[in-house]
Image (cartoon, rainbow, N blue to C red):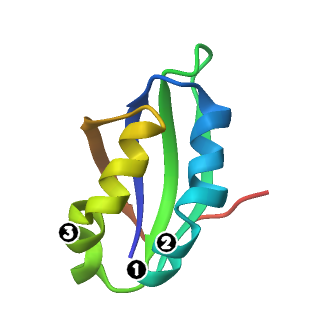
């Protein structure tokens, strides 16, 4: 399942990228999550991303994983601001 989501960040886009590329790498692999695209607004307080999870039944487990929560919080993600905007059936990235 592919989906577009958004959430607030407080420590900038580079810090969030480090979270995804390094700190959460093992957890993303464990739960079958892949981030295809991400961008931030001008003041780097909100991220918009398109991600995919192989097994949609694992979304809740991933979001409830204590280590995932800790790492996301430390990276400045406002967990309560997360919003899934839409599922995605077709896309193209140039």
Numbered badge on residue 18 = none
Give the vertical position of 81 relative to 55 (above or below).
above
Which tag, 3 or 2, sits closer to the chain's start? 2
Q: Could you say where residue 82 lies in the image, as x and y percent from the top left?
A: 29, 41
Which quarter of the picture shows residue 23? bottom right
Question: Secondary structure under badge 2?
Answer: helix
Q: Return the x and y of residue 22 as percentages of the image width and height.
A: 65, 59
Q: Which mark is residue 60?
A: 3
Tell me where residue 84 appears, x and y as whole percent: 29, 50
Per the model, the C-alpha gap separating discs 3 and 2 is 13 Å
Q: Which residue is mark 2?
A: 28
* C-alpha gap between disc 1 and disc 3: 10 Å
| Tag 3 secondary structure | helix
Answer with left or right where residue 73 lies relative to residue 52. Answer: left
Count neighbours of disc 3 (C-alpha within 10 A) and say few if under 14, some if 14 to 19, many if 20 or more: few
Q: Tell me which residue sits at (31%, 52%) in the image.
A: 69
Image quadrant holding the N terminus, namely: bottom left
Dots 3 and 2: beta carbons under 8 Å?
no
Instruction: Report the disc number at residue 31.
Output: 1
Q: Residue at x 58, y 13 (%)?
A: 43
What residue is shown at x 46% (from left), y 22% (from top)?
A: 10
Residue 26 visible in the displayed image: yes
Q: CA distance from mark 2 to mark 1?
A: 5 Å
- Disc 2 to disc 1: CB gap under 8 Å: yes
Question: Nearer the N terminus, badge 1 or badge 3?
Answer: 1
Query: Callout 1 environment at 10 Å: few (<14), some (14 to 19), or many (20+)?
Result: some
78 w.r.t. 5: above or below: above
Q: Position of residue 94 (x, y in %)?
A: 79, 57
- Given residues 56 and 74, the one toward you in this image is 74
In this view of the protein, can residue 5 be seen by the observer?
no
Foreground pick, 21 / 57: 21
């Amino acid at each position: 399942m592919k989906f577009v989501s958004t959430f607030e960040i407080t420590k900038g886009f580079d810090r969030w990228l480090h979270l995804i590329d390094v700190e959460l790498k093992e957890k993303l692999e464990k739960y079958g999550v892949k981030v295809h695209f991400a961008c931030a607004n001008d003041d780097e307080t909100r991220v918009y991303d398109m991600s995919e999870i192989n097994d949609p039944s694992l979304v809740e487990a991933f979001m409830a994983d204590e280590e995932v929560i800790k790492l996301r919080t430390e990276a400045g993600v406002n967990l309560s601001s997360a919003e899934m905007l839409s599922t995605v059936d077709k896309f193209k990235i140039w």
